[in-house]
Amino acid sequence: MQKNPQKIHNRRHMFTAALRYAGAGLLAVGGAAAVAKRKRLLYDGKCINRNICRDCPIFARCGLPLALSSRQAQSRKNNDPQE
């Protein structure tokens, strides 16, 4: 007695599709968790860029002490022309 090749083919496709969708779901959940963690750190007032203010995307509106002093130093540097 032979197995139905169409039935095996459908099972294989169903299994690969299930794995594909499970992987996509895990990626989506991981991405959402990363975004939520970043927003939580910002809300708690913690640095999200390892205290590297120069390349930080939210440097202009950051209220952390390091960012404030860095902006103050930049403004002093820009206002005092060097000869």
Image (spheres, rainbow, N blue to C red):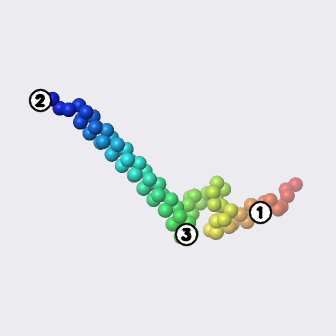
Give the left or right position of residue 46, taking residue 73 as reference.
left
Q: Distance between the residues labelled 2 and 3?
A: 66 Å
Give the percent coordinates (x, y) of residue 55.
64, 54
- Element assignment for label 2: loop
* Number of residues whose C-alpha sits closer than 10 Å to that of mark 2, classed few (under 14), some (14–19) or many (20 or more): few
* Number of residues whose C-alpha sits closer than 10 Å to that of mark 1, classed few (under 14), some (14–19) or many (20 or more): few
Sequence-first tag of 2 and 3: 2
Give the percent coordinates (x, y) of residue 24.
41, 48
The quadrant of the image that shows the N terminus is top left
Sequence-first tag of 1 and 2: 2
Q: Which of 39 and 20 is in front in this view?
A: 20
> Residue at point 71% right, 63% down?
71
- Element assignment for label 3: helix
Which of the numbered marks, if any, corresponds to residue 43? 3
Give the percent coordinates (x, y) of residue 61.
66, 65
Which of the numbered marks, if any, corresponds to residue 75? 1
- Quick check: marks 2 and 3 in contact, CB under 8 Å? no
Identify the image quadrant of residue 42.
Answer: bottom right
- How many marks the image carries: the answer is 3
Mark 3 vs mark 1: give the one in front: 3
Q: Distance between the residues labelled 3 and 1?
A: 26 Å
Give the percent coordinates (x, y) of residue 25.
40, 51
Query: What's the residue type where badge 1 is placed?
Result: Ser
**Residue 53 versus residue 23 in the image, above or below:** below
> Residue at point 56% right, 60% down?
48
Mark 2 vs mark 3: give the one in front: 2
The residue positioned farthest toward the top in the image shown? 2
Identify the image quadrant of residue 14.
Answer: top left
Give the left or right position of residue 21, taking residue 62 as reference.
left
Judging by the rendered image, the residue that carries numbered circle 2 is: 1
